[in-house]
């Protein structure tokens, strides 16, 4: 049986904003149901995202332990633009991967502790970041193992690897683009410019434009990942991101100027 909970704090903790009329939080065991004015019902299992984060952190540590047990003391640590090894180092440098995963988990944990009104990263983005990092760790360990065993697929497979990273990055940009319009004014995430932080109206319109820009940039990165590889792909991705940031910032400024013209007394 569902019982209403004095759970505004818990609702905010799990990404629900209940500070609007008609929103009520109900709990059934560990699951929370938020009922919205339009009758829409969202369910989110408490602690599920944190369990996924801990699971991915543990997977990162296990991968590191397994590969370090079989790799020699010196392994490839860096590749040039032609996917040729240009630096070797200690295998224990690869402990950086679980270390960064731990830092990401700590960051996500602190982001959930922000006061009400500071929108947190949604759970799916937190998990996506960690999963992407685990895939990158697996790829680097496999490359090192293949190279040390004399069976390295590089540089031939390097182009496919760069394309895969580009595709994942494009998907990430699209997901963030769909998320941005839902972000409330905060000190952590979103299109944060000196103009978008002026008030909630300018913020919301800036996030809407930034969301569209991120989605467009994401699809452009996907197209570049299909048609390009290696250094040209990297240059294209950087160019797309820089151009998207410049256009979004300029749009935020124009939105603020338009708001000033409509509200000259404020």
Image (tube, grey):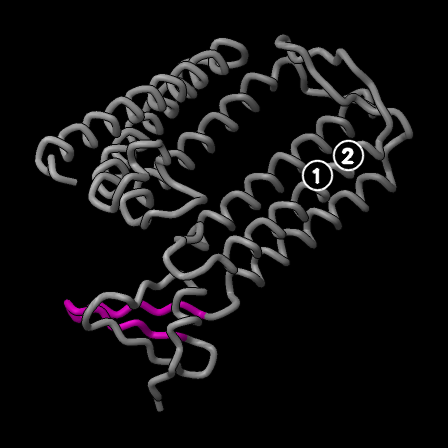
Q: Residue furthest bottom?
A: 1
Residue closest to the eye, 206 or 210: 206
Residue 73 locus on image (x, y percent): 91, 29
Q: Residue at x 69, y 47 (%)?
A: 60
**Residue 94, which numbered label?**
2
| Camera-side residue of 47 and 149 | 47
Q: Nearer the viewer, residue 254 or 180?
A: 254
Q: Secondary structure at mark 1?
A: helix
C-alpha distance separating marks 1 and 2: 6 Å
- Disc 1 crowd rating (10 Å Cα; few below 14, some 14-19, many 20+) is many
Is residue 159 magenta-colored?
A: no
Where does the image place residue 238, in percent across and percent down from the top left?
Answer: 45, 17
Q: Where on the picture, by quarter, is residue 109?
A: bottom right
Note whether 135 is above or below 116 in the view shown.
above
Q: Quadrant of residue 181?
A: top left
User: Among all residues in the image, which is located at the extreme left?
Assistant: 262
Q: Is residue 136 above or below residue 88?
A: below
Q: Is residue 76 above or below residue 191?
A: above
Q: What main secondary structure does the magenta stretch of the protein show?
A: strand
Q: Which residue is mark 1?
A: 97
Residue 41 lies in magenta, yes or no?
yes
Residue at 81%, 46% in the rendered image: 65
Which residue sits at x=53%, y=10%? 231
**In the rendering, at what x and y percent does residue 45 appear?**
44, 70
Q: Secondary structure at mark 2?
A: helix
The C terminus lies in quadrant: top left
**What residue occupies the far right of the structure in this picture?**
73
The residue positioned 22% from the left and 39% from the top of the image is 202
Which range of residues does the magenta coloring cover?
32-45
The reply to whether callout 1 and callout 2 are in contact (CB within 8 Å) is: yes
Residue 89 % position (x, y): 84, 23
């Amino acid at each position: 049986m569902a019982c209403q909970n004095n759970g505004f704090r818990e609702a905010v903790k799990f990404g629900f904003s209940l500070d609007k009329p008609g929103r009520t939080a109900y709990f059934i065991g560990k699951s929370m149901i938020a009922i919205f004015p339009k009758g829409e019902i969202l369910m989110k299992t408490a602690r599920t995202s944190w369990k996924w984060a801990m699971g991915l952190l543990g997977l990162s540590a296990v991968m590191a332990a397994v590969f370090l047990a079989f790799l020699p003391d010196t392994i490839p640590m860096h590749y040039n633009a032609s996917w040729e090894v240009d630096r070797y180092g200690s295998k224990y440098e690869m402990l950086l991967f679980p270390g960064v995963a731990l830092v990401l988990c700590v960051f996500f944990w602190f982001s959930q502790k922000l006061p009400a009104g500071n929108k947190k990263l949604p759970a799916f983005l937190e998990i996506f970041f960690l999963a992407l990092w685990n895939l990158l760790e697996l790829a680097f360990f496999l490359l090192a193992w293949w190279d040390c065993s004399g069976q390295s697929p590089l540089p031939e497979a390097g182009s496919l690897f760069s394309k895969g990273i580009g595709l994942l990055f494009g998907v990430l940009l699209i997901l963030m683009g769909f998320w941005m319009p839902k972000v409330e004014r905060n000190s952590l995430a979103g299109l944060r410019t000196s103009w978008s932080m002026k008030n909630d109206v300018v913020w919301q319109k800036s996030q809407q434009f930034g969301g569209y820009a991120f989605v467009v940039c994401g699809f452009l990165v996907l197209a570049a990942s299909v048609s390009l590889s290696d250094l040209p792909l990297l240059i294209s991705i950087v160019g797309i991101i820089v151009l998207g940031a410049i256009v979004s910032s300029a749009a935020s400024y124009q939105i603020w100027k338009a708001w000033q013209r409509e509200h000259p007394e404020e």
